[in-house]
Amino acid sequence: MVPSSIGFAVAACLAIVVVVAVESYDVKLTKRSTLYIPDHYNPNATAHYALFGGSAGQDSYDDSTKIAYVVGGTVIHAIDVSNPDNMTIVAHVEMANVDFTDVEFCGDYVFTAVDDQAERANGRVIIYSAYNATSMSMSEVVQIPVGAVPDMLKPTHDCSKVIVAVEGEAYQNPPNQITDPEGLVVIISFHDTISNYTKTSLNFTKYNDRVADLRSSGVRHVYQENNNPFSNDVEPEYVALNADGTMAYVVLQENNAVATVDLVSQNITGVHGLGYKDWSKLKLDPSDEDRGAFLYPYSVLGMYQSDSAVFFRFKGVDYLLMANEGDAKDYSFGTYKWSEEVKAGKIDASILPALDATTRDQLTRDTLLGRLTVSVSPAGKNSSGNLEALYTFGGRSFSIRQTNDMSLVYDSGDDLSKRLYAHNMDLFNGHVGKASHRPFEDYDLRSRSKGLETEAVATGEIEGRTLLFVANERPGTIFVYSLDSDVTKPEFHYIYSGIPETRTKSWQELYDDRQLSEIDCEDIKFVSGDKSPTGKPVLLVTGSVSGTLSIINVEVTKSPPQTEKPTSSAGGLTSELTLAVITTAVVYLCGRMWP
């Protein structure tokens, strides 16, 4: 029999075990202000605005002067955001027959990537001096040729190098024919002055005879017509840098891969496939004709095909946060036409011999798999010319991968789709179908093709947590998650949208009334409180379709720990702990209270 004094001690120790500290942590996004940006300027310098104008693709920010730089189409804008409630365009540079694809500020210079629309092989980096408040202008410093269709650039933290992803996207040349140039990673190293540089262009030719080995990890050699080699098919899309600027991670979106680049030896060290997502273990809405959001498992594989990626370190381990947008190759150049895209129901059943009977039946129904966009590229076929699976574009998710081998440590699965439907069903897999439509009328239109299209990601550190911001292109939402102690368990917090209402006004009316923003979120930048124009953490967000730059407040609520006694009811602490854990804790805490 246990002495009463010992029994009392045991009871006291048990009380200690079940009394816990509960801390509340929440994040919310609220719009501070939005600036509408012209897509071009008329001959009399009058600004022209338009929905679908594409005036706000990418942005960058100089925290010392509180000037943001935004590029889109033929124009780069300098925008004074020092008064966050009244952002003002202070300068612009317009250039004919080009497409500004990216912008970065570093070391008193503005770096832009430029796709030459007249001479596609003549892509270049154009460097400007930072906005001068006295002259109210930006001056061009130097142009550096880099190759066909540069898509993104990234300077190292010390501004001594700029890494450029030269996509080498195919184009028409000569008429009615296709030219698919090499995809490149270009490293520009600056010396005494910005005009004194060396340039190193890295291609992928050494991987041309390794495609079969790469394929097993999910790497795709998509366009193989006319003996097109892998080095020309590959399309570098996005660049992320590690903490010390010695490694670059270059996303090859259409190829479903990431290339690792050693910036010290200036060498491509690997091409890592991103694998495939098994939708038979998740829930997918593959149809725009099912009159709703009907999410079910299907025997379909999703190609992650990440677009943007950002580097972050968590608990001493290096990771990439990746936006799994998806993208297909589709060429229509005069009389020359080639596409890997097809509606699943149009596939000849003879090239899908391994397909089960249930899936075959689903392919005959437009409300199920019949209208899902899938790939029929040789990248997904075996030596007999048969498709190995139904491959659809994009992961409709965000992922976290370790940088050392690109292994997947977390994917959001179908979480984004489920949460968006629960939060605002009118935005589920929608986009701006017609400007005259009200938003709810374009609901579900993108279910058959990449869904909400996760486009851009960013990370930030607040109150000891790592925040993950995930922007979705269709029609424009930002999800917020955070990491506390486990990288494989992001905690969801909030869904933000720049669409104030969905059933009264049309897209065009919302735009004309200056109520619409973040439509097609192409870029998001986290700015910490010490660098922000508001003095508190914010996001700078561009919307390509809405032609907007917004300042969005990142509001964190953190309640102090409070002691609570959980009950044994569902959801209480004791219902989540096993008896073994409680017993171990009691023994550990109380074992020394008696001999």
Image (cartoon, grey):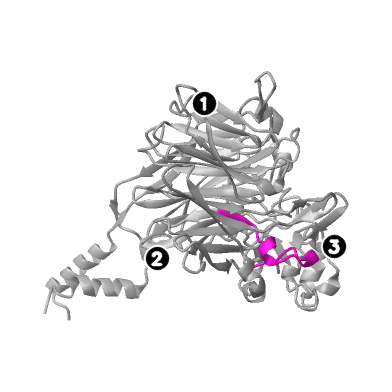
Q: Label 2 is placed on what type of residue?
A: Ser
Labels 2, 3: front one:
3
Q: How far apart are marks 2 and 3 (CA)?
A: 51 Å
Relative to residue 327, is residue 139 depicted above or below?
above
Q: Could you say which is closer to the camera, residue 98 or residue 394?
A: 98
Where are the magenta residues, as a range? 218-238
Q: Could you say which is closer to the camera, residue 153 or residue 472?
A: 153
Q: Name the residue under label 1.
A: 137
In the image, which disc is placed on residue 575? 2
Relative to residue 44, is residue 387 depicted above or below?
below
Tell whether label 3 touches label 2 (CB within 8 Å).
no
Q: Label 3 is placed on what type of residue?
A: Lys
Residue 237 magenta:
yes
373 sits to left or right of 175:
left
Tell whether label 3 touches label 1 (CB within 8 Å).
no
Where is residue 421 drawn, in percent x and y? Answer: 62, 49
Q: Distance between the residues labelled 2 and 1?
A: 64 Å
Relative to residue 423, is residue 369 depicted above or below?
below
Dot 3: what SS? helix
Q: Label 1 is placed on what type of residue?
A: Ser
Q: Could you say which is closer to the camera, residue 166 or residue 422?
A: 166
Labels 2, 1: front one:
1
Q: In which quarter of the image is the C terminus?
A: bottom left
In the image, which disc is placed on residue 346? 3
**Can residue 518 be seen by looking at this rendering?**
no
Q: How far apart are marks 1 and 3 (CA)?
A: 55 Å
Where is residue 286 drawn, in percent x and y? Answer: 72, 58
